[in-house]
Image (cartoon, grey):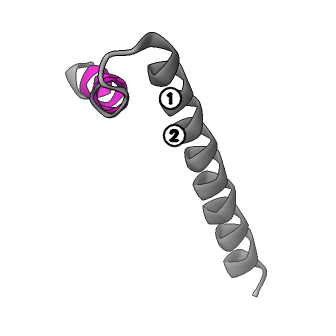
Amino acid sequence: MTVLLVLAVIPLTVAIVLARGEPVRTISCLCAMSVGCFIACTGLLGLLRNSHRT
C-alpha cells in the first residue's frame, strides 16, 4: 500500500515542481506526462505481443 501511494505521489510532485506551483501549468504537465506514459505503455505492449508471436 505504501509503495502504491509513493508511486502515485511522485508524478504529482514532479508536475508541481516543473510547473512551479501554477494550477494550469500543473494540469498541463500531468496531461503531457500521461500522454507520454500511454505512448510508452502502448509501445511496450506492442513489443511484448510481437515477441510472443515468433
Query: x, y percentage for residue 9?
Result: 30, 22
**Residue at 66% in and 63% down:** 43
Chief secondary structure of the magenta portion = helix
- Say which of 54 and 3 sits in front: 3
What numbered label is drawn on residue 38?
Answer: none
- Say which of 1 and 16 sits in front: 16
* Mark 2 vs 1: CB contact within 8 A: yes
Q: Quadrant of the N terminus?
A: top left
Q: Which element carries disc 1, helix, strand or loop?
A: helix
Query: x, y percentage for residue 31?
Result: 59, 31
Q: Is residue 14 magenta?
A: yes
CA neighbours of label 1 inside 10 A, class few (<14), some (14 to 19), many (20+): many
Q: Quadrant of the C terminus?
A: bottom right
Query: x, y percentage for residue 18?
Result: 33, 34
Q: Is residue 40 left or right of residue 6?
A: right
Q: Which residue is most to the right? A: 53
Q: Is residue 23 left or right of residue 47?
A: left
Q: Which residue is most to the bottom? A: 54
The residue beneath circle 2 is: 33
Q: Is residue 24 above or below residue 36?
A: above
Q: Is residue 18 above or below residue 41?
A: above
Q: Is residue 37 left or right of residue 14?
A: right
- The amino acid at mark 1 is Leu
Residue extent of the magenta highlight: 4-16
**Residue at 31% in and 16% down:** 21
Which quarter of the picture shows residue 48?
Answer: bottom right
The residue beneath circle 1 is: 30
Q: Is residue 3 left or right of residue 54?
A: left
Q: How far apart are the two marked residues, 2 and 1, measured between alpha carbons?
A: 5 Å
